[in-house]
Amino acid sequence: MNELDLTKSSGGCGANSPSVSLMKFWLEVGGNQEVKIIVTQGVQADQVDMWAAAMQDKGVKILNKEIKEDRVIYTVYLP
């Protein structure tokens, strides 16, 4: 399973935002697979939730969301 760890990125707006990183990752690894996305709790997790909601009509699904200490680990299906 491909993995994207965003815990070291700034989590802000612009080119380093989780949503932009997710789009780039999706383009790089392709679709029709499950991926693991690791983010920090708070702003990054909120942005992943919002991105997945916005991409739901494209077929993106959050299959699992697990909280471990200060991290949130998502399993996401990318169509």
Image: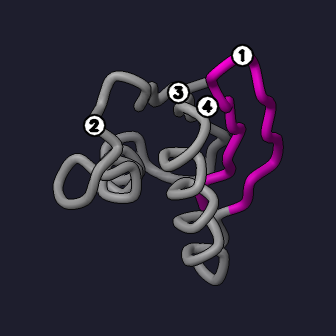
Residue 70 is inside the magenta segment = yes
Alpha carbon distance from label 4 to label 3:
6 Å
Q: How many circles with numbers are drawn on the protein?
A: 4
**Amino acid type of disc 3?**
Asn
Alpha carbon distance from label 3 to label 2:
21 Å
**Amino acid type of disc 2?**
Ser
- Residue plotted at (43% across, 25% down): 7
**Marks 1 and 4: in contact by CB < 8 Å?**
no
Q: Observer-nearest residue: 35 or 11?
A: 11
Where residue 30 sits in the image (x, y, percent)? 43, 49
Q: Nearer the viewer, mark 3 or mark 2?
A: 2
Left/right of residue 1 with respect to residue 69 in the rendered view: left
Mark 1 neighbour density, 10 Å: few (under 14) some (14–19) many (20 or more) = few
Magenta part mainly helix, strand or loop?
strand
Where residue 48 sits in the image (x, y, percent)? 55, 54
Mark 3 neighbour density, 10 Å: few (under 14) some (14–19) many (20 or more) = few
Residue designated by label 4: 36
Circle 2 — which element?
loop
Kindly identify which numbered label has been placed on residue 69: 1
| Range drawn in magenta | 61-79
Q: Choose the circle earlier in sequence order: 1 or 3.
A: 3
Residue designated by label 3: 2
